[in-house]
Image: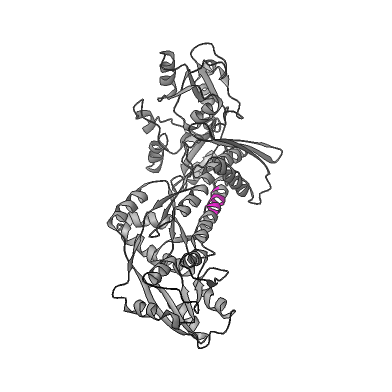
Amino acid sequence: MAARLRANGVPVEVKTIVSDGDLRAPETPIGEGIFVTALERALVAGEIDLAVHSAKDLPLDEDPQLVIAAYPERADARDALVTRRAERSVEDLAIGAKVGTDSPRRAGFLRALRADLDVIPLHGNVDTRLRRLDAGEADALLLAAAGLDRLGLGARIATRLDPESMPPAPAQGALAVQARREDQEVLDVVGRLDDAEIRIAVVAERAILKAMGGGCRAPVGAVAVQVDGDLTLLAAAVSPDGRARHVTRIRHHLDGDGSLARSLSLAAKELNTFVPLRGHVVIDTRPEVEESEREAMASDGFRVLHIPSIAIRPAKGNGGLDRARSRIADYDWVVLTSKRGVAALFDGLSAVPSSVRWAAVGATTAKALQERGAHVDCVPASARGAAIPSAMATLGSLNGRRILLARADAADRALPQKLQELGAQVDDVVAYQTDTAPEASRRAVLKALAARDVEAIMFASGSAAKGIVELAGGEADRARAFALLAITIGPKTSGVARELGFKVAAEAETQDAAGLRAALRRAIDEEVERWVESQLRQPA
C-alpha cells in the first residue's frame, strides 16, 4: 500500500500499531473488531492519516468520523488447509484428526464436511498457530489463504478449499483503507487506488452479514464476483455443530437502481430460514411477551431482549370498572383495545351477556375475548383504535347506543370522542393503569445500551417510550437509546417517541404484535438498503 502511494508521488511514513488482537493471550478467543479498534483510535486522534485493515475484520458499522476510502486490492479469498504431515485434502485427514481454527464459520463448515474430525480452538497469530501445529498440538489448521500468501508462507498450504464446501468469510482477502471522513486531501489521494469491482463485491458480501445481523465472527460465508455488469454471489450459513447448513446463490445485474440491497436481503432471509442466526438484537419494552411471539421473532432472525419499560397494575379504587361490570348487560356495545383490558374486565365477571355486542381493536384482543366466551362482532381491518367507531357504524347506527370502553389510564381521548360524535353514550372507564418499570429493568437497559449489538427498540405505547428515557438516566445512555431504530405501534406512539428524541424507523400498520414484528422487519430491510448505498458510494 505504501509503495503504491509513493509511486503516485505521495510521501508515506509507515507506523506500526499493535492491535488489541495482537496483545491478547494465545488462548483468548477473538472478539468483534479486536484487530481494528487500536488503529481507529489512532486515526480519530490524528496520530495517523490512513489505516490499512483486512476488510473482513472491520465492524459493519464503523465510527461515523471514519470512512473506507479505498478497497485497493484483493488476494485469494479462499480458506486454506495446512497439515502437519503429507495430507493434501480434508478427505485425506485421519478419522478423529485434530484441526485447529479460531473461526466459528470454519469450524461449522468443516464439521458439515467431516463430522468425525476433532475441531479444536487454536488461537494466536499465523506464526504462532503454525508453531503450535508443528509442535503437535493439532494435525491440521484452517487459515485464510491470503494471509499465508502475504506472509510468504504459501508453500505451507496443502490445498485451497473450494468455496462451495468452505465458503470464505465476507471480504476475506481484501484490503480496506480507512481515513477520516472530513480529511478531503487524504480522501482525494487514496480514492485513486479504489477498485470499483472489489468495492462492489466486498460490500455485497458484507451486506449478507448486515442483513442477517451478524458480525465478522458469525458462521456465515459469502463470496462475490463481477462479470460483464452482473454480480454473482454465493452465500452460506452453518450451525456450530455443522448439522444445519444452507447455501444460496444470486445473480444480479448491476444497473444502479438500488435493487441490489433487496436481492441481498432476500438471500439473507433464505439463509436465516434454514440456519437461524438470530443476529438482530432488539429491545422489546412491552410489559409481557407471549411465548408464541418470542418464537415468531426468533424465526424472523431476531434475538429479543425483553426489558419492560412500564409495569401494568390494577387500577386503584376502581369503582368505575366495578360498576360497569355489574351492569354490563345494560350496554349495547363493549369495546376493548388490548388483551389487558379484557383480563381486567372479565376478572370477576360472572357471565357473558348474550345481548351485548363486542368490539376488539385487533386479532390479539379478539382472541382474548373469544377465549373468555365472548362473540366478537367487530374487528376493524386496520387494527387501529381510531378505526373502531367507523367499523362499528357499518353494523348499525350508534346513535343513542350505550357503549362501555375499558382501557388504560393513559389512553388518549380520540376514541371515545369519535364514538360520541356518532351519537353514542360512552362510559370510558379505567381498566388498568401503567406504573414505573421494576428496578431490574433499569439495570437491564443500561447493560443493553452498553452493548454494540443492539439495533432496535420497540414501543407499544407512548408510556413505554417515556419509561425507557427514565430508565436510561444519563445523557450518554439516552443518546445511545435515541440512536436505535425505534419501532412503534402507531401514530400516537410515534408522536410521543419523536418528541422525546427517538428517530422512528417504522410504524406498525396494524396495532398488534404481528404489526410490530412486520414493522421491525421493514425497518431492518430499509437500514440494509441505506447501508449498502452508503458503502457503495466512494467518498468524494
Q: At x 53% / y 78%, what residue is drawn? A: 389
Q: Nearer the viewer, residue 57 or 402?
A: 402
Q: Main secondary structure of the magenta part?
A: helix
Query: Is 148 on the left-hand or right-hand side of 260?
Result: left
Image location (x, y in percent) of residue 363: 52, 64
The segment highlighted magenta reads 524-531
Query: Is residue 245 in the magenta section?
Result: no
Residue furthest out toward the top: 86
Asked whether, in this view, residue 446 is left or right of residue 71, the answer is left
Residue at the image position 59 percent from the left and 28 percent from the top: 165
Q: Please, is residue 321 above or below residue 19 in the view?
A: below
Check the image and report above or below for 253 versus 315.
above
Does any portion of residue 215 appear in the rendered image? yes
Q: Residue furthest right?
A: 228
Of residues 402 and 151, which is closer to you in this image? 402
Give the vertical position of 334 relative to 517 (above or below): below
Q: How far across and how far down the image is residue 323, in percent?
A: 35, 80
Looking at the rendering, which quadrant does residue 483 occupy? Answer: bottom left
For residue 348, above or below residue 447:
below
Residue 409 visible somewhere in the drawing: no
- Magenta stretch holds residue 527: yes
Residue placed most toward the observer, 300 or 74:
300
Q: What x and y, as percent, mark residue 336?
A: 46, 72
